[in-house]
Amino acid sequence: MWDIDRVARELTCRATARRAAGRITTEWPELDLARAYTAQDRLVELRVQERAETVVGVKLGLTSEAKQRRMGISAPLTAWVTNGMRLAPGEPLEVASLIHPRVEPEIVFEMAEDLAGPGVTRESAMRAVASVRAGLEVIDSRFVDFSFALPDVVADNASAAAYVVGDMVVGPEALDLAAEPCTLTVDGESVAKATGADVQGHPGEALALAANALGERGHRIKKGSLVLTGGLTDAVFLTPGATVTATFGHLGSVSLSGT
Ligand code: OOG
Ligand code: MG
């Protein structure tokens, strides 16, 4: 028999064993979005208790129109990031320590103020942002071939595995985030291009959506926390020896190498 706690433990086990498996929603169709978010909170609580990690921020997933169309949804999802997921700039990632890691470029906010809905707009959200940085997120679905229904990926903490944030720190008013260009390269070869507008029209829109959705569930985005606003492009697989780099127009660049 499935229940929310078993979902959280099953996904935790898969991550620890580095083994993907099938969708939970096929075995337990009662896993709806509300239960999936409760399972996500439980999964992160287990991580905090068992690995002594702390929650340091929030991530959005499926912010691009392309990903939303593929999943048949119209709003992004939210998940949690912990200090244990953070890689230092230049720190390589051992590919075999994960299941099938993929890397995507993201615009990362650091919060100057607490933020929670209802009623958060892009403008009020951006006023709560202290600084903006380039980031790379590593996603590693605990489902075979990254094949999941929405409640599966929500329960799986939106495939969160690791992230790295660039050194350059920019004030939010210093640049036009919708127009901010980004090129993703693998070993110096361009594989995708995007702008900040590919994240929900504007990364501040993604932040507002997250604050409102989290507010509805009784959570808030805390002052000092990070917000990974969502992949600007599709994610690329990380392979041993390869270096993935995101180069932005005004936010500098950030790289991650697989070993
Ligand atoms: C879900 C995670 C998506 C993003 O930025 O869109 C995500 C997945 O694609 O596995 O982190
Ligand atoms: Mg992401």
Image (cartoon, rainbow, N blue to C red):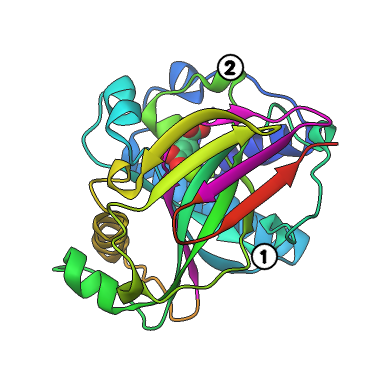
Q: Left or right of 43: which side holds 174?
A: left
- Callout 1, which amino acid? Asn
* Viewer-proximal residue among 242 and 226: 242
Give above or below for 54 relative to 44: below
Q: Quadrant of the C terminus?
A: top right
- Label 1 packing within 10 angstroms: few (<14), some (14-19), many (20+): some
**In the rendering, at what x and y percent does residue 152 appear?**
46, 31
Q: Is residue 234 magenta?
A: yes
Q: Left or right of 152: which side holds 114?
A: left
Q: Quadrant of residue 214?
A: bottom left
Name the residue carrying label 1: 83
The residue drawn where x is 48% and y is 52% is 248
Range shown magenta: 225-247
- Label 2 packing within 10 angstroms: few (<14), some (14-19), many (20+): few
Q: Is residue 120 visible?
A: no
The residue drawn where x is 40% and y is 83% is 112
**In the rendering, at what x and y percent does residue 215 appear?**
27, 66
The residue drawn where x is 68% and y is 59% is 86
**In the rendering, at what x and y percent does residue 106 appear?**
48, 49
Name the residue carrying label 2: 145
Q: Quadrant of the N terminus?
A: top right
- Callout 2, which amino acid? Asp
Q: Is residue 205 visible?
A: yes
Q: Left or right of 197: which side holds 240?
A: right
**In the rendering, at what x and y percent does residue 85 appear?**
68, 55
Give above or below for 79 relative to 250: above
Question: In the rendered structure, which disc, 1 or 2, sits on the residue that comes first in sequence?
Answer: 1
